[in-house]
Image (cartoon, coloured by chain):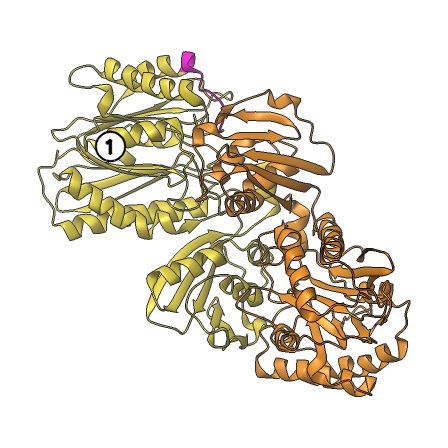
Chain colours: A orange, B yellow
Amino acid sequence: MSVTAAQGFTAAGIAAGIKANGNPDLALVVNNGPRLAAAGVFTSNRVKAAPVRWSEQVLRGGTVSAVVLNSGGANACTGPKGFQDTHATAEKVASVLGGEHNAGEIAVASTGLIGVLLPMDKLLPGVETAAAALSADGGEAAAIAIKTTDTVHKTATAGQDGWTVGGMAKGAGMLAPGLATMLVVLTTDADLDAATLDKALRDATRTTFDRVDSDGCMSTNDTVLLLASGASGQVPAYEDFAAAVRAVCDDLARQLIGDAEGASKDIRIEVIGAASEDDAVEVGRSIARNNLLKCAIHGEDPNWGRVLSAIGTTKAAFDPDRLNVAINGVWVCKNGSVGEDRDLVSMKGREVHITADLAGGTESAVIWANDLTAEYVHENSAYSS
Amino acid sequence: MSVTAAQGFTAAGIAAGIKANGNPDLALVVNNGPRLAAAGVFTSNRVKAAPVRWSEQVLRGGTVSAVVLNSGGANACTGPKGFQDTHATAEKVASVLGGEHNAGEIAVASTGLIGVLLPMDKLLPGVETAAAALSADGGEAAAIAIKTTDTVHKTATAGQDGWTVGGMAKGAGMLAPGLATMLVVLTTDADLDAATLDKALRDATRTTFDRVDSDGCMSTNDTVLLLASGASGQVPAYEDFAAAVRAVCDDLARQLIGDAEGASKDIRIEVIGAASEDDAVEVGRSIARNNLLKCAIHGEDPNWGRVLSAIGTTKAAFDPDRLNVAINGVWVCKNGSVGEDRDLVSMKGREVHITADLAGGTESAVIWANDLTAEYVHENSAYSS
């Protein structure tokens, strides 16, 4: 049900002709109120795409009446013309939707190749087509239209007691924090203000999308939006609402890792015994980004030496002679040296669990990553993306 | 001529049976004086192999009479027994060489799989074999014996006016700073003290081995040693000597990149217009480690958007709208946006030059990297290394 699971939202996904292959490439999500509260988090990359620059401004007001998203082009590194194109897109959406809509409350998100201007002669007429296709069942079509190299579209829902949080996500490569590279739109019919949405969204992304690292590459276009219509009339307790937002983000983040370009393994890296959560995250990311380890996991080789060499590059608090590492439950490294027999480790499944114990405290963190495969190389070298 | 190009040194390389395939795996380099001055730099990885911990202590004294190096096992993450094995190896070398030699002046270096104890029943007899094979022509054999996945052995020489600097290196993967992962032994017959050697070595490695980044992975065993015999009786001017050391390091570093595991391209990344050298290095490393860009280079795709997204993840001083990027001399990105026609870029050769202009100052730095290929994945997933 995606972004239309919550009451008060309509959506559409259509083929505007931005993608040369004719696949759907334009999505529209409209908040029909009565509330138009919204929050957003964006890439921390300092090279930001035009739609990110635009939407950051829009979200500053805490009000979003619609989101227009395109695949087939990132509109990043496109100069003043690119920003004008984003502005024109928002104006077009406001004009086509009519009524109270104004461009300053329309968020824009784009994904695709960096450094290419969007074909506005196709995109703007596409907005009209999308607006005409808006429906309360349009969530799936919208989720499909934002796919790039995604093999499947990604949606999730949660909620209780008459209110719902729903969402859609795209992302299959360039997945790394801050904010795993992705476009995500979440909607809710809970009756909450922008400040509450902002807090719940930041709480959720910090431990979900921010802890996904498929390939260490940070995008210029990351955008995660949360829109509230208030249509349910319900005002959930903050903790309940935050838990639902976190559940949807966690579900979508896991789907992103499961569909990462060329990956054959999903790697869950849990760092325990850390002196601080920051230490745990730093070590987890270092392990997640170690190409040699990622290759070893692909080869189903429990090469714990590469885990230790990755830990050793961090500033986290640990004593090299007290480090412990388990792979799929077998403690192959104990006290910084050889532990249980590595032949006991089975790595046949898609999911591989690495536990790194820093033996220096009680804090922990989980990072999700992927293996490195020849298919990843092929997908990212055979054509521009 | 490798480590025996300079007068006063003998060397040997033999097969001790550490490697299962019977290839040479043990090298010995002996300084016959009259001086025994030495300097060393080591991995900055906090997880350090036993031989690194040992040799760091040895080098503190500024005197090294011999270096014993083995391939076929890193002796890293091997606990107290691993350190005892390193100590025993140094004792064995001192005992076999006899005379004034003592273990506290014998450096040890190891390379190979992490987390496996060395077969001391083969290594110690191998020391005797190597000592018996020592000769003033042994430099090539020593360079061959330290190879792991290297396809060729690496040697270089420089010098003038009756003095020489020679060296050997191994390294083909896990090449990243601080200190690209490698074992390197440099020798000279110049008559210089340990402090001068230390300064020249640190000056040289800072801009050579420290700026090689084949795969972003830092080793536990990096060791670069410089030994002086004084046998030429010459005392070169510091600048001349430092230039020769730098030339040998630069030559060897370039050979390491040229032989990196699975690589099909050598990528020279020059960052110009930086506010500081540190900024230039940070940006260069970020570009060097971007897997998506490395894939694009492999595919001969001048995907400058991936260069910008890598720059954007750094803390360096720059304005995104003033960034310029050239690939093989074509300025495909100007002022953060589309520049010259990317179809003008030819990427057929093995060497690819990327210039990133931060337009924020006058400092610069060069980082060397490799592309990411299916062969790299294969080499690092098909078996433990």
* Near-viewer residue (A168 or B99): A168
Q: Is residue B365 left or right of residue B34?
A: right
Name the residue tied to disc 1. B59
x and y, in percent, of residue B98 in the image = 20, 14
Q: Residue at x 70, y 58 (%)?
A: A171
* Near-viewer residue (B349 or A227): A227
Chain letter of the residue carrying label 1? B
Query: Which amino acid type corresponds to the residue marked 1 in the rendered image?
Result: Leu
**Image height of A264 relative to B300, above or below:** above
Quadrant in the picture for residue B185: top left
Q: Does B117 lie within the magenta span?
A: yes
Q: Residue at x 47, y 73 (%)?
A: B323
Q: Does A178 lie within the magenta span?
A: no
Q: Is residue B100 left or right of residue B296?
A: left
**Image height of B309 relative to B169, above or below:** below
x and y, in percent, of residue B276 in the image = 34, 65
Q: Is residue B120 left or right of residue A147?
A: left
x and y, in percent, of residue A57 in the image = 62, 77
Q: Which residues are magenta?
A: B114-122
**Image height of B171 relative to B215, above or below:** above
Q: Secondary structure at mark 1?
A: helix
* Near-viewer residue (B1 or B15): B15
* Near-viewer residue (B126 or A179): A179
